Amino acid sequence: MAEDALTRVSLVAAPMPRLKLTLEYEGTRYVGWQVQPNGPSIQSTLQDALQKLLGERVFVASAGRTDAGVHATGQVACFDSPRVLPMKAYTMGLNGILPPDIAVVAAEEVAAEFDPRRWSRGKRYRYRLSNRRTRSPLLRTTHWEVFAPLDVEAMRRASQALLGRHDFSAFRAADCQAKHAVREIRQVRVEGTSGDTVAVVVEGTAFLKHMVRNLVGTLVEVGKGRRPEAWVAEVLASRERKLAGATAPPQGLVLEEVFYGDGPPPRSLGDAAVGEEDEG
């Protein structure tokens, strides 16, 4: 009887391990994270590489859908593996299959219920600008080249109006599908000096589509002296996208890090869908 019970247990299929990958990529030649019919995506390229590694097609979910031309040093993706492999297979092995502009920088097995989007407790983005007087062939795909001198201190002061929990409707893309525009910005830093490289670092619970790029485009208006520092707070309060600055180009944006705790974060009723709607 005991032998029959043991046999039955051994015939039960073991659950597929769920793998969490941290990715770095240079997004210049991709249409963005999500699979699209008009060109190669990060998602499709990673799924193709995993198919070669695992011998089966798997679906890969991510923490956020970066746009065409946007880069990452800390994108998080996960999938259920049909095979049990050593972790180095997902770093050294997978990196031998992936193209040079995508790499797995870390891999680990996580809980079966782990969701890279809904379990996220926040993200940090870095937007990079080159404020040199002449163009730079080496920075053109990784920085927004702004040739007019920028008042970095004015940008720094103006950016503080963005801190906290607000309705960011003035900084969302026209086609953003989020049900509401309330988000919380934990930190905004404007780093660097005029005439050299400048970075706007934004950390928050979640982001609307094009939100960071629209924030940067607005701060650059202040930096160029076209708008006063107080204008940023006025735009935020207006909730009108047409009053904000132009959307900064994609190549300056980097998804730097996604933050996690031991499980999904607690959310109020108004926040329930933030994680799944986040588009960075």
Image: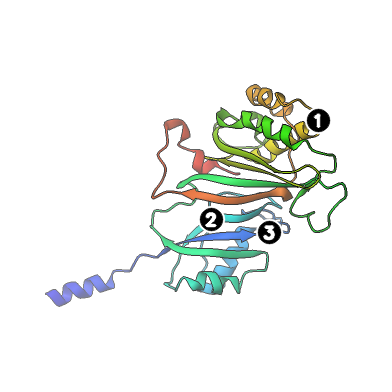
Residue occupied by mark 2: 76
Residue named by callout 1: 225
Image-quadrant location for residue 240: top right
Structural crowding at the residue carrying mark 2, measured as other residues with C-alpha within 10 Å and reported as few (<14), some (14–19) or many (≥20) = many
Please name whichever residue, 7 or 194, is drawn nearer the observer in this view of the structure. Answer: 194
Quick check: can you spot residue 107?
Answer: yes
* For residue 197, side relative to residue 45 (left or right): right
In the rendered image, the residue lying farthest to the right is 134
Disc 1 from disc 3: Cα separation: 32 Å
Q: Position of residue 272 (x, y in %)?
A: 45, 36
Instruction: Look at label 3 and name its amino acid.
Output: Glu
In the rendered view, would you say 50 is above or below 273?
A: below
Residue assigned mark 3: 26
Residue 8: x percent and y percent? 22, 72
Q: Judge by depth and name the residue closer to the eye, 3 or 187.
A: 187
Q: In which quarter of the image is the C terminus?
A: top right
